[in-house]
Amino acid sequence: MIKKHRAFLKWAGGKYGLSDVIRKMLPKGDRLIEPFVGAGSIFLNSDYEHYLLNDINQDLINLYQILKDQPEQFICDAEKLFSPENNQAEVYYQFRADFNATNDVYTRSLLFLYMNRHGYNGLCRYNKSGGYNVPFGKYKKPYFPKDEMYFFAEKAKKATFVCEGYRQTFARAQQGDVIYCDPPYVPLSKTASFTSYAGNGFGLDEQADLANAAEEVSAANQGSVLISNHDTIWTRKIYENADKLKSIQVARTISQKGNGRKKVAELLVAYKSKKKGS
């Protein structure tokens, strides 16, 4: 049985629960490219020689790069923030204000991790001005993910981190690469949309363009692509040229306490790299 590894960040839409299914659908290759790496559950639970990991959230990528480069120092400094004295609303809001006021990458990375674990429901959200605005989470004892961070730092030796648009990341693909895309999902209802992880939305135009990018890369034999999304009439339409569609039922947490769960249908969509002459 393969040991599964949890991400050290809490993340809306994280793929830890689906990592087994996704890993089995990912083709073999030398390098896995993730244009929407998020918390990195597929990176952590897959086995490739090299990884190219992108996210549009600069704070997230800066944190990963620092953890890769300075794991001992960063983990030591971060652990000091996880104390009973710091698990109070007024302290949280002061740290949040400090985060929004500074451009120091190391300080922002420490506070980003602190807010991820102390903030409400593991959300990552920014206002239109670029300010982090997730409220205090009121947890009894936020967990410090020390072991998970060390594992991430060790595996990150195989990874290159970038912060750019998904089209730029697709342009880096070469023959033999495998691309896994976990974009912000198409909303199931008009009130369910949550796409502002980095302060910029990912709308229906971007969803359709991502499907086009997958078709283009696979047709040019520059890599095979796997995309996850909600299973809706609209997503089935934009992915109609895919080589394979797999629908699965996934339990989704709909309350902070985790006891409000419902199952929703998700799609895993595969575009196979087209061999020359096929």
Image (cartoon, rainbow, N blue to C red):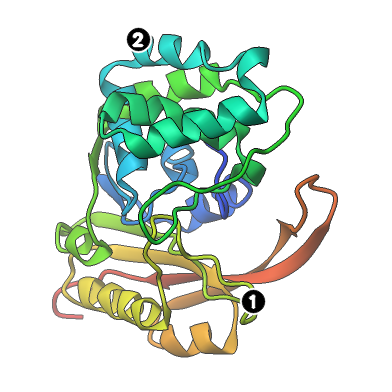
Tag nearer the camera, 2 or 1 = 1
x and y, in percent, of residue 46 in the image: 44, 41
At 85% across and 49% down in the image, what residue appears? 259
Please tell me whether mark 2 sits on a helix, a strand or a loop: helix
Q: Is 83 above or below relative to 247? A: above
Residue 100 visible, this orientation: yes
Q: Earlier in the sequence, mark 2 or mark 1?
A: 2
Please tell me whether mark 1 sits on a helix, a strand or a loop: loop
**Among the 4 quarters of the image, the one containing residue 59:** top left
**Among the 4 quarters of the image, the one containing residue 188:** bottom right
Q: Which mark is residue 73?
A: 2
The amino acid type found where label 2 is placed reads Gln
Crowding at dot 2, Cα within 10 Å, few <14 / some 14-19 / many 20+, comes out as few
x and y, in percent, of residue 240 in the image: 43, 88
Q: Label 1 belongs to which residue?
A: 191
Crowding at dot 1, Cα within 10 Å, few <14 / some 14-19 / many 20+, comes out as few
At 54% across and 65% down in the image, what residue appears? 194
Closer to us: 145 or 274: 145
The amino acid type found where label 1 is placed reads Thr
Closer to us: 231 or 66: 66
Q: CA distance from mark 2 to mark 1?
A: 42 Å
